[in-house]
Amino acid sequence: MRTQEKQQWVRERIVQAEIDKYIRDDGRDYVDDASIRDLLRLRGTPDATQVRELIAKALEIQTLSPAELSVLMRVESPALWEEMRAAAGEVKHKVYDNRMVTFAPLYLSSKCVNNCLYCGLRSSNEAVVRRVLSQEEVRRETEALAGRLGHKRLIVVYGEHPESGVEYMAESIRTVYDVRVPARKGIGQIRRVNVNAAPMSVAELKMLAECGLGTFQVFQETYDRRAYAQLHPAATLKGNFRWRLYAMHRAQEAGIDDNGIGVLYGLSDWRFELLAQQAHVLEMERFCGIGPHTLSFPRLEPAVNTPFVDAPTWRVSDEDFEKIVVLGRLAVPYAGLIITARESPAMRRRLLPLGVTQMDAASNVGVGAYADGQENQREERQQFVLGDPRGLDDVIREWAQMGSITSFCTAGYRCGRTGKCIMDLLRSGAEGKFCKLNAVLTFKEWLDDFATPATQAVGQALLQKELAEIQTRQPQVWDVFSETYRRIEAGERDLYF
């Protein structure tokens, strides 16, 4: 593509009217830096009674305000922190039971017009090999994910570039859904495609909605305007803070009611980020009528030829990262909480009991990584360096040993349990009952089709426990459920409640 054509594409990306319409009458945004910094200046240890009242509010699946979250942030008592950690796990179990949803990231393009200082794929990084996969290459990647590994759910990732614009995105999503791969007993296929991409206009988002988009993710990266301006050059698309800030408003207008937000921790003070994200959550509840379906908690990781990540001012320690996860779970108790393979296996084990509901596994973050094989991956093809490169079988076996059942369920999205519907079900605890049934069915599928003998043994033991629990706690559905389970054993696939 010629430079002139690319420049024209960049100039047409941002629709100023689709920013202005959401800004408050006083000209301020929903993230108010001054009020957040006022909360951060508060000192003093909070009263234990107040802390326990806020824990109780979270256990009632009610969203905390930024001021309430700031109270929990100031807790110093080890005993109270232990109560908060326990409550985080209890909130997760109340809403999601013991399920762990898994997925894989699929990078389809590494060309990008932006120049973010912390990103290995920034436009000025000449050490990176650039690619945009053809549709045949997308098919091969999907075959590896759905066939060799047995994934059912993907998050597809695109650089912001005219060669991977919305038309390419829509076509690639359709390609992914079209793939069918024979498995041991059934068929391997991707049943849900989520998208992590740059902010788009309402018209473009409608195109994605029509091709079967699942969750649409846009991370603000940092809500701190000063840090944002330093990290994202003003001459680039990503330099427009507000275009990104109102991405989810446009998604809702386009009919996409399943949205995910997040922060890249390590770009600014994590306390500011968490409070600002909470303001974003409340704005979504106000404007959209529903909050985010997921909150993601990526932490800054090394990337080839990217000096910024070697000594960041705001590096987040493991201890603080654990606090972030606990606080995030208590602050937005209904949301799915995602921890990625950026983290080490040890860190992921440490965080799992604290309210995490989703983790990726067998992940590669290089374009063309799955078909080419892990052994052929090089840093110059990747956005960052992974902390947990383990295979899906190893991760699922570990989760089962820890008492968590891996769910490949996508039924809720195909049954219309999205948006306000799923939020109501999550807040009431009813969604967990649906999802436990479907988690067991999809886990049985995966064990029969893809698991090694060692993982099958651990998984079958967990399944027997889950079956007994369903028979005891949901006797009204047992006859129908047990017949459906028998059909899965016999080789039928994609059965759900």
Image (spheres, rainbow, N blue to C red):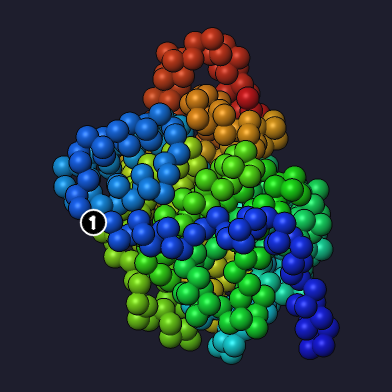
| Residue found at x 47% / y 74% | 226
In the figure, residue 343 lies in which quadrant? bottom left
Residue drawn at 76 percent across, 63 percent down: 17
Above or below — where is 411 with respect to 283? above
Q: Amino acid at mark 1?
A: Arg
Quadrant of residue 202 within the rendered picture:
bottom right
Quarter occupied by the N terminus: bottom right
- Give the mark count: 1
Side of 256 where 466 appears, left or right: left
User: In this view of the protein, can residue 172 be seen by the observer?
Assistant: no
State whether residue 323 is above or below residue 469.
below
Give the residue furthest to the front.
26
Q: Position of residue 117 (x, y in %)?
A: 51, 81
Asked whether 404 or 394 is in front, the reply is 404
Which residue is the site of mark 1? 43
Q: Give left or right: position of 177 versus 425.
A: right
Q: Is residue 408 visible?
A: yes
Q: Is residue 84 left or right of residue 464?
A: left
Looking at the picture, how far across and down is residue 344, in whole percent? 36, 61
Q: Residue at x 82, y 63 (%)?
A: 167
Q: Regarding mark 1 in the picture, which secondary structure is present there?
A: loop
Residue 495 location (% of width, % of height): 66, 29
Indicate the quadrant containing the C terminus: top left, top right, bottom left or bottom right: top right
Q: Position of residue 370 (x, y in %)?
A: 60, 64
Q: 10 Å neighbourhood of mark 1: few (<14), some, or many (≥20)?
A: few
Q: Kindly identify the residue that appears in the image at 43 percent across and 63 percent down.
A: 34
